[in-house]
Image: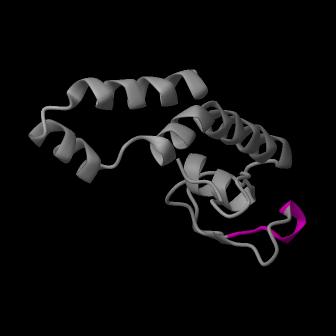
Amino acid sequence: MTINRLTETANLVDALESKWAGTKWSCENELYSALDWKDDNTVPKPTEEEINTEIARLQTEYDAQDYARNRQEEYPSIEECVHAILDDDLENLQILRQAVKEKYPK
């Protein structure tokens, strides 16, 4: 799924790249009114409502994975996991992972 990682919000470009991949278009400012749908497309230009529906779908999908992104940031690193395995400290590793899972539930 493509979404603007800086703003964490889906936009017109994300919607077009997701649902209308392979089509040709240009848009100078992410506004539907500025969307130039190229004549050689085999599919008709989507309506503003269709694009807004896809934006909402992408945003919902992205928001639903917030817990996973938060977990990934706080889980022990690969290096920490390797050290725990080599040092036979898997119990402590599991405790750390469980704490993160409880902090960010699904």
What is the residue that sits farthest to the bottom in this orientation?
A: 28
Q: Is residue 9 magenta?
A: no
* Left or right of residue 50, residue 96 in this image: left
Q: Nearer the viewer, residue 69 or 25?
A: 69
- Residue 104 position, x and y percent, is 59, 28
Residue 35 falls within the magenta-colored stretch? yes
Closer-to-camera residue (61/19) = 61
Horizontal and vertical percent position of residue 16: 64, 55
At 86% across and 65% down in the image, what residue appears?
A: 31
- Image quarter hosting the C terminus: top right
The answer to which image quadrant residue 32 occupies is bottom right
Which residue appears at 80% of the width and 44% of the height? 52
Task: Find the residue positioned furthest to the right.
Answer: 33
Residue 103, located in which quarter of the rendered image? Answer: top right
Q: Is residue 89 left or right of residue 4?
A: left
Residue 37's place in the image compared with 18, above or below, is below
Q: Residue 2 placed where, x, y %?
A: 56, 53
Going 84% across and 42% down the picture, which residue do you hit?
Answer: 49
Which residue occupies the foreground of this view, 85 or 38? 85
The colour style of the image is: one colour
- Asked where in the image residue 105 lies, by quadrant, the reply is top right
Quick check: 58 above or below 27?
A: above
In-front residue for pair 22/80: 80
Q: What segment carries the magenta color?
A: 32-37
Left or right: 89, with 64 as reference point: left
